[in-house]
Amino acid sequence: MLNNRKPFGKLMNVLHGINPDMPLPGPLEPYLWENMGPGPFCKVGRTLEYEGEVPKNAYYVVSGFVIVYGYNSKADRYVMRIYGENTIVAMDCFMRQQVSKYTIVGCKDTLVWSISNTHMQQIYKDLEGMKDVAWQTASKYSDHMEEMKNRLLSKTMEERVLKFYKYFDRLLPATKSPVRDVDIADYLQMSVASLKQLRRVLKDQGLL
């Protein structure tokens, strides 16, 4: 059972806002309050779900940052997504209960809440039509996150860095960032040296 109404209210606002034309069933809110798990807290970086395994949970980022790593055709790891506070991490492989192509990592000092597949299946059983709502909601949210990244990558490298830190302002100052420069650079599709140089230029210009 959860224990903090303030972030729970933010979670419900996110869920309501993803697809306003599809109202959430009334009993969903008390069910989530009773059955989501308050944690884990990642005091240090911690792997939440592993590539090659069926994901056990979906996550809500209460505070901190979660990174989703994908793997290309050469099995090289890359940063697929970075999730900040007040976002939901529920990949297709969790919804479908298939072997995951991703590794999900909670960064240092990150708190997530989780809900298991077992509880999701119970929601589908108890709340009529909830499976369709959940699938459409997850799909629309995933599309939104992908579109956000694509819009970012369509800009010049300097604009990418500026927009990234405007969105993830809690990653500044960089010396205290829980997300490594190598991961940010990979997400922005540039070298670490370029990231550092552009960040320094933007800071000198008073833009960061």
Image (cartoon, rainbow, N blue to C red):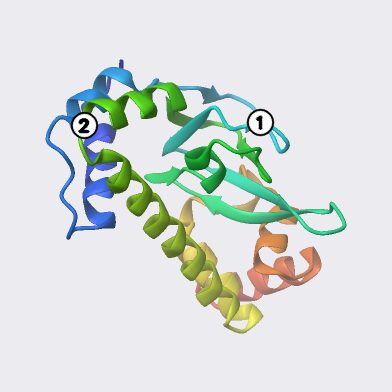
Question: Which mark, residue 47?
Answer: 1
Reply above or below: 76 against 64: below
Mark 1 belongs to which amino acid? Answer: Thr
- Give the class, few, some or many, for how many residues have Cα within 10 Å of label 2's Cα (few <14, many ≥20): few
Give me the residue at 56% from left, 79% from top. Answer: 159
Instruction: Indicate the position of residue 182 as horizontal and vertical percent values.
Output: 75, 55
Q: What is the x, y in percent for residue 136? A: 34, 53
Q: Amino acid at mark 2?
A: Leu
At horizontal 39% and vertical 50% (from top left) the residue drawn is 138
Instruction: Nearest to the eye among marks 2 and 1: give it.
Output: 2
Work out whether mark 2 precedes mark 1 in sequence or the reverse, and give the earlier one. 1
**Mark seen at residue 27:** none
The residue labelled by disc 2 is 127
Asked if residue 99 lies left or right of residue 168, the reply is right
Q: Identify the residue at image location x=71%, y=68%.
A: 195
Q: Is residue 142 above or below residue 151?
A: above
Q: Position of residue 65 (x, y in %)?
A: 53, 43
Quadrant occupied by the N terminus: top left
Measuring 32% from the left and 19% from the top, which residue is drawn there? Answer: 35
User: For mark 1, does the 10 Å Cα neighbourhood hold few (<14), some (14 to 19), or many (20 or more) residues?
Assistant: some
